[in-house]
Image (cartoon, rainbow, N blue to C red):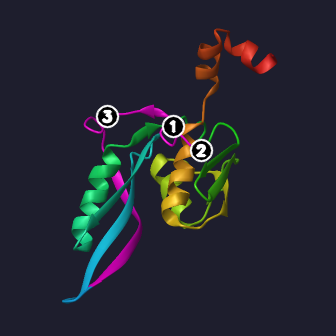
Amino acid sequence: MAVNSGIRVKSSEIELKDKLVAINRVTKVTKGGRTFSFSAIVVVGDENGIVGHGLGKAKEVTEAIAKGIDDAKKNLIKVPIINQTVPHPQKGKYSGARVFLKPASNGTGVIAGGAMRAVLESVGVHNVLAKSQGSSNPHNVVKATMDALGQMRDAVSVAKQRGVTLDQVFNG
């Protein structure tokens, strides 16, 4: 289950936008009473093929979000985008979550649920059909979507990897 199978990117030279996917309040019961803490899962991306996800935990919501953004900037991958959609159908999985991404024609929009939508919008995909199967846990759905995006390859990289011309990739 290699989630970070895409091309790694440094966060210093790009302008990233962050999206909050989910906040979870956790209660720890001690003899002194209840102690609340928060965990936030955040997705960052430049809306042009670069995306990352992170988890932040803290006593306050804003601090948890800030930690999540910092963590997300450490996990960036580059995803090929062709005509504002993904290059080919791809399945991804992480733990109990399974996702399916399929290219769509112009004008379709992002047909995806909450956690997947945040990742796909952050990466800059405008037309895609997506289905989430299995677990609906936002943490696992985000990681499964990142897995699927990390496995995406465009025709140029396939030709380069195989050592053939672009025509030979399409015509066999």
Tag 1 secondary structure: loop
Residue type beneath disc 1: Val
Q: Residue at x 54, y 34 (%)?
A: 80
Q: Nearer the viewer, residue 103 or 22?
A: 22
Residue type beneath disc 3: Lys
Q: Is residue 140 above or below residue 9?
A: below
Q: Nearer the viewer, residue 167 or 115?
A: 115
Which quadrant holds the C terminus?
top right
**Residue 8 x/y as whole percent:** 41, 33
In the picture, the disc for residue 70 is none
Residue located farthest toward the front when viewing the structure as drawn: 31
**Residue 21 x/y as whole percent:** 43, 65
Quadrant in the rendering for residue 156: top right
In the picture, the disc for residue 148 is 2
Q: Nearer the viewer, residue 16 or 151?
A: 151
Circle 3 residue: 10
Is there a contact, CB below 8 Å, between mark 2 and mark 3?
A: no
Tag 3 secondary structure: loop
Can you tell which of label 1 and label 2 is closer to the viewer?
Answer: 2
Which quadrant holds the N terminus?
top right
In the picture, the disc for residue 79 is 1
**Residue 111 x/y as whole percent:** 64, 60
Q: CA distance from mark 1 to mark 2?
A: 10 Å
Earlier sequence position, callout 1 versus callout 2: 1
Read off the magenta span. Answer: 1-29
**Residue 127 x/y as whole percent:** 62, 51
In the image, is 135 to the left or to the right of 105?
left
User: Is residue 66 in view from this perspective?
Assistant: yes
Q: Is residue 29 above or below residue 10?
A: below
Residue type beneath disc 2: Ala
Neighbour tally class for label 1: few under 14, some 14-19, many 20 plus, Cα within 10 Å: many
